[in-house]
Amino acid sequence: MTPEETPGSQMALALLFDQQPEILKKPVQAIHMAITGGIQSKTQRLAFNAMLKHALEEHARNPGLETETYSISREELMRIIGYSSPNRKHLKEALTQMQKLTVQWDFLRKDGDPMWASCVLLPFVAFDRDKVFYSYAAQIKPMLFDSKIYARLDLRIQRTFRLDPAAALYEWVNRFRTNPSKRTNEMTWTDWRWCIYGEVSETSILNEYKIFKRDKLKPAIKEINEKSDLTIELIENRDGSRSVKYLQFIVEEKQIFRAIPDVDDKGEWEKRLEDLGLSARDRKKILATYPTAVIDAHWKFTMARVSDKSQPAIKSPSAYLKRALEGNFAPDVVEKAPAGGTQDMEAMRDIQTKFTQTRNAEAEAMLSEMLEVDREAVIAEYNAAQDSKVTQVPQDNEKRTSRYMVPLFAWLAKKHWGEPTPQDLFQFALQTGAISLK
DNA sequence: TAGAAAGAGGAACGGTACGG
DNA sequence: CCGTACCGTTCCTCTTTCTA
């Protein structure tokens, strides 16, 4: 069942684990979309995500400002989508082509608002020497920018895929990673083909399931299992007939990404240093000489350098780490204690409260968007974790007042997004304008 | 009802076009 | 030169369905 994992891919995953994530909070309606009248390449898909991420950040910085046209530096765009070729022609062509692609938004909610039924993917794109300008259709902007229901998509992972359908399938299954049932939705195989590949003509050989599976599905599943933080498994449903009718996936998060390792723990560091290839003597010396915070900083420094493709490759990460530690390469790691004063403390608490409220609202939206069976599973899990009966969420829908539900939302938010990290709070404070970088 | 035929899918090949 | 996308082919297995 477990896919073959080469040491190389494991190393790549381990490296990924130590980088800063690049999360796009992508509205689910924009994930559940299908290209009509053509196919979408990986470059286009990633570019759309990169541009959306950029626009969302822009939007968060200036919430009041109604921006018509966004711009992103070409360098940054190319970095996010992993476009390394010096030949810009194809990037330009791919982006220009996006103006011709139309999409069916919110594909899963068939009875949804018909206003978003179909619309051009990117109505406007322009270039100059080092910037790319783009804008969205006015009708879909609220959906893109104000959506409460989103999935966290890690663009670092998505750009490591080489196969088009792998990037597309990953995006779809990633959205179901937190489902208690560990299942995606079930769709006819032609709908899956539509979502992860595009619309095909009547004469295409991809009208045969076995060809689609051979050329698109299987390679995509293989690549996702090898390179991503998820393992997925295909379920085929023949529905009594001879041919495969419906497809579904089992989605599980890989172990390494589930538990945040305790970096203060010497044992954990011992193992990490060993994995890197350091000898027992070196490990002992390093752990005895430097505090873990310093090792951690240099570890991150080393990993960033190792995965930096713009510089010559590092032959031996372990030797590099040693040298980095000896030379104290990493910038200062002294933890900055927050400036004292009760005013600051109160401002901090205020940010924390607002952050919690926002997250709870997001958790509520997520819950309401779940399938009935999944929602009840979540509630059952929550109830099981309650010591006392009075805090349990009642079975009767009518009786589910905020007295019960708000703690549930908080629990759910913590479960899915974890404890807010300092970065989360910092980001949030920046976005809401509570603090500013000057 | 046994055996043939047909349908669906899988495995392992092959090729061309094209871009980095 | 290699990897990806796309398009074929041949031979095989398994299951359903047809038919003598």
Image (tube, coloured by chain):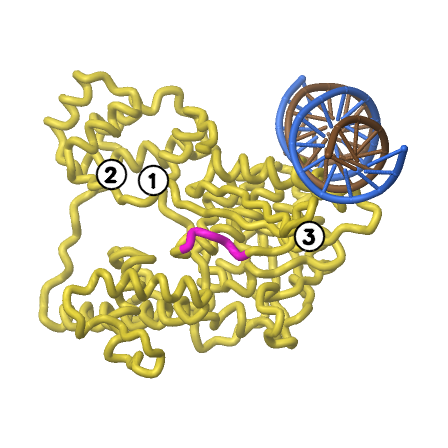
Chain colours: A yellow, B brown, C blue
Say what amino acid the circle numbered 2 marks: Ala
Name the residue beneath numbered marker 3: A190
Name the residue beneath numbered marker 1: A255
**Most common SS among magenta residues:** loop
User: What residue is rendered at 22% in x and 32% in y?
Assistant: A328
Name the residue beneath numbered marker 2: A297
Q: Earlier in the sequence, mark 1 or mark 2?
A: 1
Residue B4 picture location, percent across and down: 84, 28
Q: The C terminus of chain A lies in which quarter of the figure?
A: bottom left
Q: Nearer the viewer, residue A85 or A372?
A: A372
Q: Earlier in the sequence, mark 1 or mark 3?
A: 3
Q: Is residue C1 left or right of residue A274?
A: right
Figure quadrant of residue A235 = top right
The crowd level at tag 2 (other Cα within 10 Å; few <14, some 14-19, many 20+) is some
Magenta stretch bounds = A181-185
Quick one: SS at disc 2? helix
The mark closer to the camera, 3 or 2, is: 3
Figure quadrant of residue A8 = top left
Say what amino acid the circle numbered 3 marks: Thr
The relative height of residue A350 versus residue A77 in the rendered view (above or below) is: below
